[in-house]
Image: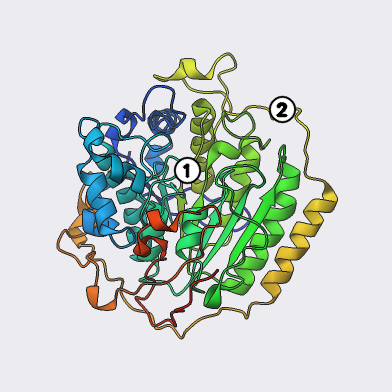
Amino acid sequence: METGGNSLPSGPDGVKRKVLYFYDPEVGNYYYGQGHPMKPHRIRMTHALLAHYGLLQHMQVHKPVPARDRDLCRFHADDYVNFLHNVTPETQQDQLRQLKRFNVGEDCPVFDGLFSFCQTYAGGSIGGAVKLNHGFCDIAINWAGGLHHAKKCEASGFCYVNDIVLAILELLKQHQRVLYVDIDIHHGDGVEEAFYTTDRVMTVSFHKFGDYFPGTGDIRDIGYSKGKYYSLNVPLDDGIDDESYHYLFKPIISKVMEVFRPGAVVLQCGADSLSGDRLGCFNLSIKGHAECVKFMRSFNVPLLLLGGGGYTIRNVARCWCYETGVALGVEVDDKMPQHEYYEYFGPDYTLHVSPSNMENKNSRQLLLEIRNKLLDNLSKLEHAPSVQFQERQPDTELTEADEDQDDGDERWNSDSDMDIDEDRKLIIPSRVKREVIEPETKDPVCSMGVDVSPMPIDVPTVKVE
């Protein structure tokens, strides 16, 4: 089955990509609770499709090494991580004050194995970044990751640990600039907030805006201090279709790649932007959604593909299976093979589903104004910004034995310097969340951003109002 992870030639470049895929068989067993829309079972359904379509044989398949407490604390506050580690459904009633403080409860419930779930999905994303840093693959995939709402000190929007921020911090050890692109229907607020004041990470989020969770992501939110113009927000309305979406996506991303020139890209592929999503209101087809993956792949820059939202789980599995094929350069048949979850996909039993006839509320005039505004913002950036950069080996060790193991389970040396370097841990102010009106209930440290200082960088000391 193992073919070294080399994909087939794809597109005009005809270049093979080495793809590495992270999957833990236990991930589908975690359960947020009855009636909760977030269902980790969708990851297991995706994996089953990948297996029966024969896509696993074209990739290296790795079981993620669980992220440790100190790995998570590279972004998250120690007391928040400690709380996640120790809280259980049985003990939560004794910790009501902390539940409120860390925003754990209804949207983000305490469930059996919560911390192990966080360790698993974060471990896959960090592990993908490590593999990319060492040049062991061109594309790394972790469909269990992409939980973009989690903040330094609190859970939010079904997300507890922000695996994306942790992966970007890992990539910053090797790359001077990292691009984050988010195609989930919800604004990628947690990632934007973490890197709002730095020019080493550019965040680009395409999302529904206006009376919609999390309420952030205005086109006027552009970053602060050294990070000014390094946050791009693309606010969209209901019913956007493939053609309208790519009228914005392709020119904006092309300009971003031209002026920012990232050393690595993280693409959050939230599938709640698909037509027919249980919580969404967009009208993208699976091919339209996957066109974003295909477009990012075409730049031949190290690429980390992550999951995210997606609540009509049969369509989530369809989407991420097809997008795995796109990453590999393998065209998958629309007729679905028989497998253990086949009954979920009736009555058509096909990979693709047709968009609906819902109204597209995004007028061409509105799209043109958004496109022009964002391209104008990008024109204000100097090409390839930031400090002088000297290539060096990434801090996280990865032993040769890792690549030689048949099961590919190991990611990093357990004694490597994934620890926080306390001497250089800086506190970087982030944007103030406009929806927060209770500063007295928040710890001062929790309104801060993230340390992105493995390489010299000027750190702003003023908090944005």
Q: Nearer the viewer, residue 59 or 223?
A: 223
Which mark, by number, is residue 239? none
**Left of 161 or right of it: where is 311?**
right
Q: Nearer the viewer, residue 48 or 181?
A: 181
**Left of 5 or right of it: where is 235?**
right
Hey, what amino acid is under mark 2? Ser
Q: Is residue 349 above or below residue 109?
A: above
Which mark, by number, is residue 356? 2
In percent of width and height, residue 245 lies at 70, 47
In percent of width and height, residue 201 lies at 49, 68
Its colouring scheme is rainbow
Q: How packed is label 2: few (under 14 Cα within 10 Å), some, or many (20 or more)? A: some
In percent of width and height, residue 130 lies at 32, 60
Quarter assignment of residue 384? bottom right
Task: Classify mark 1: helix, strand or loop.
Answer: loop
**Residue at 50% of width from left, 38% of height from top?**
320
Indicate which disc, 1 or 2, sits on the residue closer to the N terminus.
Answer: 1
* Residue labelled with disc 1: 308
